[in-house]
Amino acid sequence: MLRGANAINLDTKGRIAIPTRYRDWLGDTCQGQFVCTIDIQSPCLLIYPLNEWLLIETKLRALSSTNPQERRLQRLILGYATESELDKSGRALIAPTLRQHAKLQKKVMLVGQLNKFELWDEDMWNQQIKNDLEDGLPTGIELSSGLREFSL
């Protein structure tokens, strides 16, 4: 499982070094292969181990290519999707178009989200966390059933 926020660097060639604690898991789970694409709700990238990405592709394939909203989602998610794999040093290359989309600078955050990573520019991540903490959960609106039943 992928969890935790990790401050890492993006090198001049556009590579990130995956923290050691994830490398063995990624090797065992997907032979170090992954797919990176954009997040359509936040200014970050999503990095899926290949086995998880195949599940996403199945869901995207089931959408209608004649429905404009569904087609837009397919176009964005699949259009930006880039396959890659960890090199022998545990580094992952992030495509230039993806780096530009997420406005990634040298300092980035790799954030585990159970079945995927989010990759954020460090400043944007810090601002997002600040906003999330300040905003808290919305009041005066109906919570989803998942949030109503959620407890720690």
Image: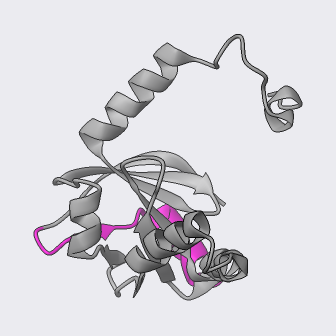
Image x and y of residue 24, in percent: 55, 75
Q: Is residue 17 magenta?
A: yes
Q: Quadrant of the N terminus?
A: bottom right
Image x and y of residue 85, in percent: 42, 85
Q: Name the residue: 58% across, 17% down.
A: 136
- Of residues 128 and 106, the one drawn nearer to the viewer in this rendering: 128
Q: In which quarter of the image is residue 86?
A: bottom left
Q: In which quarter of the image is the C terminus?
A: top right
Image x and y of residue 8, in percent: 30, 54
Q: In this view, does 101 lie above or below 59?
A: above
Q: Which residue lies furthest to the left in this view?
A: 12
**Along the horizontal axis of the image, is 24 left or right of 39?**
right
Q: Name the residue: 55% across, 82% down.
A: 27
Q: In this view, does 114 lie above or below 84?
A: above
**Along the horizontal axis of the image, is 70 left or right of 63?**
left
Q: Which residue lies furthest to the top in this view?
A: 140
Number of labelled discs?
0
- Of residues 64 and 43, the one drawn nearer to the viewer in this rendering: 64
Q: Name the residue: 78% across, 22% down.
A: 142
Image x and y of residue 78, in percent: 48, 78
Q: Does the magenta stretch include residue 8?
A: no
The part of the chain drawn in magenta is: 12-28
Q: Name the residue: 58% across, 82% down.
A: 50
Q: In which quarter of the image is residue 84?
A: bottom left
- Of residues 66 and 14, the one drawn nearer to the viewer in this rendering: 66
